[in-house]
Amino acid sequence: MTTAPTHVIDNIGVLVTNDPSLGEGPLGIVKNASLVLDNTSDAVIAVGPAGAVADDRTDANGACVLPGFVDSHTHLVFAGDRAEEFTARMTGQPYDGGGIRVTTDATRSATTDELHRLVRLRLAEAHRAGTTTIEIKSGYGLNIEDEARSLQVAEAYTTETTFLGAHLLPNEFAGRSGDYIDLVCKEMLEASAPHAKWVDAFCEVGAFDEDECRAVLDAGREAGLGLRLHGNQLGEGPGVQLAVECGCASVDHCTHLTDADIEALAGSDTVATLLPAADFSTKQPYIDARRLIDAGATVAIASNCNPGSSYTTSMSFCIAIAVREMNMTIDEAIQAVTIGGAEALRRDDIGRLAPGMAAHAIVLDAPSYHHLAYRPGVPLIAKTFGPLGGFES
Ligand code: NIG
C-alpha cells in the first residue's frame, strides 16, 4: 500500500497545538482548524484554518485534535500476572514492591519471542489509547542476561529505553545488597548500556538507599546514559533531592514530598513525573500537584504501566485522576501528558503540533479535550496518527 505524501486533518473544532505563538493561551488553541502532515518526513507541515488541501484527508467533523500522548514511564517488558496481589491490596494488604520478584521469575522464564508478543500487545493497546511516544524500562530481569535481553526487546519498539537493574534485590542476592549494586554498576551495565538511553534506580525503603542509587546513577552517567530516578513513592525520602543533585531528567512518583523537595524541584530542570494510576492501584494518597505547579516545578504525568502497581496503558485515565484528585486543571493535565512527558525525556520534537514537529496527533471522539476528564473510562480516541501503531498481531 502506498501512502500519500501529505495528509490533512480537516474540520478540527478545537486544535491543541501547545504552541502559544499559534493560538490562544498556554495550549495554543486554534478553532476551526486544519493540520497538514508530511507522511514522508513524519512532520507537521502547517497549522491553519479549516479547508487546507493535501494528497489525502481525514475529516475530524468538528472534533478536538491534540498532540499524541508522551508516556515517559513504563515497564512494558514483563511476563506473568499479579491480579491476585491487586485483589489482596483492595482488602487491605499494603504495597511494598516485593511483587517485583514474582514478575522477575515469570520474565526470566519467558522466551524472547513471548516477551516480544506481550510488548506488542501492550503497545497496540497504548497506541489505540493515544500514546505515540513511550519509554520502556527493564527491571524484571535482575541478572546480566535478562536485563540486557529485556532492553533488546524494548529497543525494537522505542528509542526511549531505560536500564533499571537497580529495581529490587533479586532473591539470589538476599542480604548482599552491596554485591548486587556492584554487579549492576559493572557487568550488568556493560551488557545493558548498548541497548539503553537512560539509567534508573528505585530509591525507596525496601529497594535501594541513597548511596546505592547514587552509585548506579554515577556509573550510568559514566557509561554515557541519561539519568532518571524512582523516588518518594511510598514515603518521604532522599529520592527527589538525589535526583536534583545528580541532574536527573526526571524523578518519578513524587507521591510524598516535603516543602524542601518541592523547592529543590522548582529550582532545577528535573521534571516531577507523577504516576496517578500507581497511587490509584496501590491506595497511596494522591499528591497535591498544585504545590508543585505553584512553586514553578515542571510536571509530567505518565502511566507507569507495569503488572504490580499500575496495570494500565491509559493516559486518559491518568488525566481524569489528576483533575479529580490532584488539583490540576484540565489544561495542566493535558500539558503534563504531552509537553511534560517530552521534557521528562528531554525531547523538543514531540508534544506540540507546530510546523517541523513530529506528526503525532490524536483525533478525539469528542468536541473538546475536557471530555478526557469529564467522561472517564470512555474510549474517546477515534484515531491516532504517529508511531507505535501496527503491532496488533
Ligand atoms: O514504578 N516502584 C517501582 N517499580 C514499579 C512497580 C513495579 C512492580 O510492582 O512490579 C513502579 O511502581
Image (spheres, rainbow, N blue to C red):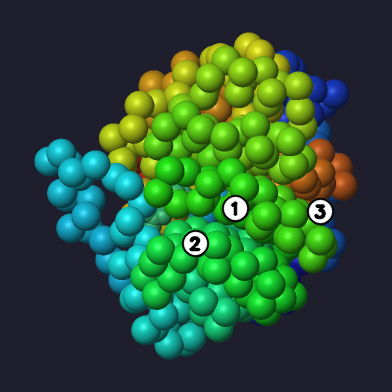
* Most foreground residue, 47 or 67: 67
Q: Nearer the viewer, mark 2 or mark 3?
A: 2
Mark 3, secondary structure of its residue: strand
In the rendered image, residue 344, in percent from the top left (x then y), is placed at 69, 42
Q: Amino acid at mark 1?
A: Glu
Task: Classify the position of the N terminus by image quarter.
Answer: bottom right
Mark 2, secondary structure of its residue: helix
Residue at 17% x, 50% y is 87
List the residue tagged with mark 2: 177
Residue 389 seen from this side: no
Mark 2 neighbour class, 10 Å CA radius: few under 14, some 14 to 19, many 20 or more: some
Could you tell which of marks 2 and 3 lies nearer the N-terminus?
Answer: 3
Q: Which mark is residue 58?
A: none
Q: Quadrant of residue 281?
A: top left
Mark 3 neighbour class, 10 Å CA radius: few under 14, some 14 to 19, many 20 or more: many
List the residue tagged with mark 3: 43
